Every structure is written in C-alpha cells, then in structure tokens.
Amino acid sequence: MTHSTERFTTIRADLDFEAANEALYQAGMTDGLPVIPPTPERVARMLEGARREPGQSLGVMGPGYGKATIEKIAVNAVMAGCRPEYMPVLVAAVEAMLDYEFNLYGINATTHPVTPMLVLNGPVAGRLKVNSGYNCMGPGWRANATIGRAIRLILVNIAGGTPGNGDRATHGTPAKFSFCLAENELASPWAPLHVRRGFSPGQSTVTVHASEAPHEINNHTSEDGAGIVRTFANSISHLGHNNSYLGHGEVAICIGPEHAETMARDGMGIRDIQEYLFAHAGNRRSALLSIGRDNFPGMAAFDADAADPFVPLVSAPEDYLLFVAGGVGKHSMAMPSFGLSRSVTRVIDAE
C-alpha cells in the first residue's frame, strides 16, 4: 500500500480481493462494506473521466484537512464502484462542499446525524441514469449508490471523518452510506431546482444539502393542495431537530409527483409553498422554553413582544429547499438540516 498524508493513493495490484479489502478495512479506509481495490490501473482509468490534472487540489477538507486532489477523489471513486463518467459529478460535489457556507468541518465532525445529500439536475442526470423516480432514495441504481458512497469515502479518507474520531456522530444514519438522487424534472409542474437557482435548463448541476435522513410525509386523503402543504408544515414542526432552534439552515422537502400535481393544479407555485411553510412550520416559544431553549444563537427571528411568539424553523421562505422526485404514490420526504449550513449548487463539467 502506498501511503500519503491523506492515508493512501493506490493499493498493490498483486493483492487479491480479500487481502486488499482486509488491509483497507484494518486501516479504517472503508465504510465497512467490501470495496473495489484501488489499483494504479483502476485509478488511471477513473482519472480519464475527470477532465482535470490528477495533482490538482480543490482545497482542504475538514476536520482532518486533507488535500482533495483529483487523484484522491478518483481513488475513492474506484473503491465505491463508480464509473469514470461519474468523476465530474464528484468533482463538482466536492467543490460545493468546500464552499464556506456549506460548513463541511461542522457537518463532518458534529454529533448530529447529518450527511451531504446530492441532488442532480440537468442533462447529466439522464445521461448517467441517476434515479429520480421509484425508490430514488433507496437501493437498485448504480449511479445513485456509488456516487453517494464515493462522497462518504471521500469524507473519511480525505477529510478525516473517521467514526468516533473525526466524525463524532452519536448515532449516525444509514443515509451516511450514500445519499444521491436526481430531480424528476419531467414529473415536476414547476421550474427545476437549478433553474430557480439561476442556472440554465441545459446546464448540469449538483446541489449539496446538509441533511438528516429522510422523514416520510404521508397524505393519501387530501383532495386539495392546501391539505397537502398543511401536512408538510405539521410533519416538520417538532422540537427534536436542529432547525427548531438553529434558523441559519434550510429544510429540504422532496415533493412526490402526485403531491406536486395536486398543489400545482390548485394554483400553488414553489414560492407559495415556501411562504406557507415559513408562516406555519415552527414552534411556539413556550414549547421551546419547556425544553430549555430560548434566544439560542442563530435562532430564527421572532416577535419577542408577543405573549407566546411563533418561532419559524428557518430565517426566510426561500430557506425551504423544494424539489420533485419519486414515483407514483401520495408521499413526500422531508430532510431537516444540520442548521448551521447553507446548501450549495455547482455546475458539473460533463459536456
């Protein structure tokens, strides 16, 4: 095994699969599952898809402050089972996570069960067959599984997020194995996420969001959009997640196509949903006081002169990150966030 300051570059080609995996596992370089041994030949093939020089560094990743070089990203992509054409997605995602607003150090080192969620938009999602429909947050799709898994390995092997050491998550979450999907743009009645963020429809992008594991929002009974958005607000209004008292962050909601169709049919646009959630998703100050939370640094603004003011989950309506994905079924998914992070979108250089 060839070592570097970020643990390793490649592994000897003469080691068999079992020996290579045992060596990597014992060195703390895997996610606990078998990996593809990153031999020099495999890494060289992966680098062919990168469109960058192998030694180029995108920056340092906390808490271990390892240099995120293109070669080291490729090593982790090999171990995750990625195809070379996935490399531009990984490069863009790492660039996004290195944005100051994303707060990678906090996300990777916290006790909170947070993980980067990747949402792809634009032509690259279809070209790489990134699932945006049935089971888009679950197993069964190579691109989703391996791109998300490569991000986790990067956070361990480059950023130093080793469980119990750099990564101090009390419990973690299964989403930390892999969390990557695409927006179902064809099923959405609204402009796609990346277009609403200022990119053109023909551009390919990845958005990273500091997410908890997805929480189901089930509404099979409402026949109008008002009932669905009311269910959204009720489902995310509880005291147990960080957004209840850290208003700097965002709450992501993956809206199921059937829910989206009903709300759009009733004239509801993205901004209407955001404004409703901003006004109705949150908690009374008395509820926060009952568990010892009051005027916590970063808490969303509230009317301190009111008898029992309402405290929203976020600081502005646009802090609800909304996108459409999934198959048939009257379900949506909510992802409360770390709270001290902003989502970031970057263009994928895959053309």
Image (spheres, grey):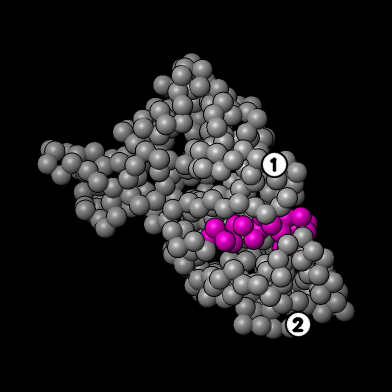
Q: Is the magenta stretch mostly helix, strand or loop?
A: helix
**Residue at position x 65%, y 40% in the image:** 202
Q: Position of residue 272 (x, y in %)?
A: 40, 28
Residue 155 is left or right of residue 275, and the answer is right
Write down the residue under mark 1. 123
User: Which residue is at the front of the view, 79 or 32?
Assistant: 79
Above or below 131: residue 90: below
Q: Which part of the image, by quadrant, shows the N terminus?
A: bottom right
Q: Position of residue 10 (x, y in %)?
A: 76, 76
**Residue at position x 56%, y 26% in the image:** 189
Q: What stretch is highlighted in magenta?
A: 76-97
**Residue at position x 57%, y 61% in the image:** 95
Above or below 191: residue 128: below
Write down the residue under mark 2. 1
Point out the tag, 2 or 1, that comes first from the N-terminus: 2
Indicate yes or no whether the magenta region holds residue 77: yes
